[in-house]
Image (cartoon, grey):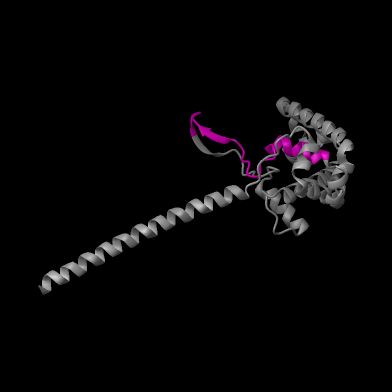
Amino acid sequence: MFKSLTYSETSSERKFHGSGKKQKKALIVATALAATLFLSACSTSPPKNPENICNIFEERRDWWRSAKAMNDEWGVPIHVPMAMMYQESSFRSRALPPRRYVLRFIPWGRVSDAYGFAQAKTMTWDDYIRETGNRRARRDNFGDAIDFMGWFITKSQQINGVSKWDAYAQYLNYHEGWGGYQRRTYLQKQWLVQVSRTVDQRSGTYAQQLRGCEDKLNRGWFRRLFFG
């Protein structure tokens, strides 16, 4: 009787511990799933119509405020970094560069460590943080990314004398770096020259669109409510 009772208690304990392990495992899975859903929710989806800068800022008013803050800080026209950002990431917050392949089919890392809206490389991003003191800046945050681009465009003007309004030359600086632009490395990359022209054309389109909606974007919620 004693042995039987002892065995019965041990068996119950085993069942209890087994059930506890299953519950713990289920809790871990649920927590991981919740974390994944939370991160997905925090991730900023691209604007629905990236071809029209008015639609972009009407959809994302916080982006408009960030773009104006960048303009106030650096004196960079909003349409230039927006056209460059379109080209770099299509306004995807967690954009990554293409993968590198070995033997054409084996994935082997990325072609660079660029990341986020502006596709900023780690070393250049660190320079931006050091010079501006914006230590909390993140590459997957639109406000930080467009401020970074404003800083870079300003540096391109200071170092290479490129106008802040010249989206073509600014994009060549952005892609090749200030030293590469000085050495004219882009002349060996006709595809890059063509892409820079595309960026310049989009910048012009954005500028024209923005002239037609800037006043509306600057209206407060009260005026928008009653006057559109």
Q: Quadrant of the C terminus?
A: top right
Q: Nearer the viewer, residue 158 or 212?
A: 212
Q: Number of marks in the image?
A: 0
Q: Horizontally, is 135 left or right of 107 in the view?
A: right
Q: Nearer the viewer, residue 103 or 145?
A: 145
Please determine whether, in this image, residue 27 is positioned above or below residue 63: below
Q: Position of residue 10 (x, y in %)?
A: 21, 68
Q: Nearer the viewer, residue 87 or 54?
A: 54
Query: Can residue 181 be seen here?
Result: no
Q: Position of residue 200 (x, y in %)?
A: 81, 31
Q: Horizontally, is 9 left or right of 181 in the view?
A: left
Please determine whether, in this image, residue 125 is positioned above or below residue 19: above
Verify whether residue 100 appears in magenta: yes
Point 43% across, 56% down: residue? 28
Point 85% across, 49% down: residue? 74
Query: Can residue 62 be seen here?
Result: yes
Residue at the outermost bottom position: 2
Q: Position of residue 217 (x, y in %)?
A: 84, 44
Q: Position of residue 180 (x, y in %)?
A: 74, 38
Q: Horizontally, is 106 left or right of 87 in the view?
A: left
Residue at the outermost left position: 1
Q: Quadrant of the N terminus?
A: bottom left
Point 83% across, 31% down: residue? 205
Verify whether residue 90 appears in magenta: yes
Q: Which residues are magenta?
A: 79-106
Tell me which corner region of the image, top left, top right, bottom left or bottom right, holds residue 157: top right
